[in-house]
Amino acid sequence: MNWNAALPLLILASSLLPGLVIFFLAEERAVTRVALNMFGALLKAVLVVIMLWGVFEGEYFETRVPFLPGLELVLRSGPLSMLLVTLSTVLWLVTTIYAIGYLENSPRRSRFFGFFSLCVTATVGLALAGNLLTFILFYELLSLTTYPLVVHRGTEVAYRAGRNYLIYTIAGGAILLISTVWLYTLAGTLEFTARGFVDHLDASLHPQLVVIFFLMIAAMGVKAALVPLHGWLPQAMVAPAPVSALLHAVAVVKAGAFGIVRVVHDVYGVEFAASLGVALPLAIIASITIIYGSLRALYQNDLKRRLAFSTVSQVSYIALGVALVEPIAVIGGLVHLVHQGVQKITLFFCAGNLAETLGIHKISEMHGVGRRMPWTMAAFSVAAFGMIGIPPLTGFVSKWYLGSGALAAGQDWVLLVLAGSSLLNAAYFLPILYIAWFRQPPVQWPAERNFGRRETALALLVPPLVTALLTLLLGLFATAPFSPLDWVRFIAGRVFAP
């Protein structure tokens, strides 16, 4: 096996092998566990940088493993794959640092970090998938490895949320498998290609292709939390803050959104999807989800539930951009895959800091918290302004391209969706910032922990500050070489090349 075939496997192994070893570590082996976590995260980052540079230079990295007659498991690099691989790798490293601090005195840490590593392995695997069969394998592995993280606290509420999560995701996986087998009988292949692989099929098969498309969107829409398939997500907020951050910014929700992108781009092809008449209904579903999620967020007093409904709304920007079938809108949707991840992980880190340091779980408990935890709330504020779309932050860049793409596509109604969403974002974030910064703090917090001269533990404080800084820098330098926007333009150039 040569280097180009081995590198995808090495990237998977960098999180898989440390995770498997961690399972067998005794709880008191904290130093070994931390060393394995950090070694795996740093090694993966180095390997991904090597692959990223190779893809930019035109190198081809692919691993093929025979599976069934005529079917192989395929791991393949590509500009689109590397977008999610890089995001997962960077945010996994940051989340690992945060999780080490967050779970410092918690039970079952070896089990947690073992599944934590397997979860990231599954996410990177589905990002590198070169065909639908490989995608399904890692898509289902992600469902199974995330379940123990959701139920980690071991309470009845956690187990109820976990059962609900499994019902949704396993049902979605079954639909994805059925639709994939159906598609294979028609197309004879499952290989992802830049322009799709079904556009050559006879016109008499187009009605079946339409049905298969919506079955696949429904399957992906479970993890992407498209309405009405979003019910599991707010309940899953019972999980620890590092898990919530991982679910919303890197793993499950982002995997669903990425799956929708794959179906539109690499299975059907954007032009063929438009000709079938399936792109506009997807844009409408995404728009309904954007407004619905924002409306539900308005009425949540629990901070993590408000952020969860915000995710329901924000992730659908990705599907909306792809469904508009216009290069500028596609750029806006794909770059939001990164921008939303960086912003949302910041918000969940900050919510975790408030819970761990002061016992704050509800927005009504946040009066004056900015005076007690100024750095945490500064990071929260930057990410919140990014979600609203205040320039020059990352959220503004995404919305600018989505709006410009909607106009170019002749879908002016999308501007109303974006404007309405931004107003609703402001309506559910600005009151939080107002009470945190301008209201008088209480005499006593719900459950305050003393961290000396620091507002909270350093391992909890540094990650949100880093991701908040990224929210600012990726917006300020959006057009710089190798920025997410620059990389997404590279992707769009391949998809829409004449």
Image (cartoon, rainbow, N blue to C red):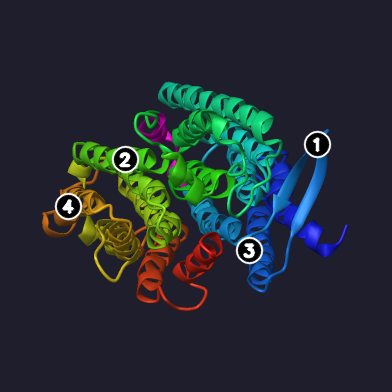
Circles 2, 1 touching at the beta carbon (< 8 Å): no
Q: Is residue 168 above or below residue 454?
A: above
Which span of residues is magenta-colored?
232-242
Q: Is residue 120 left or right of residue 352?
A: right
Q: Amino acid at mark 4?
A: Leu
- The answer to which image quadrant residue 66 occupies is top right
Q: Magenta includes 456?
A: no
Q: Amino acid at mark 3?
A: Ala
> Which label sits on residue 70?
1
Residue 449 seen from this side: no
- Find disc 4 in the rendering and name its residue: 423
Q: Amino acid at mark 1?
A: Gly
Q: Name which of mark 2 and mark 4 comes first in the sequence.
A: 2
From mark 4 to mark 3, how far is it between C-alphas? 37 Å
Could you tell me residue 58's position as x and y percent? 68, 70
> Which label sits on residue 284?
2
Q: Is residue 276 left or right of residue 344?
A: right
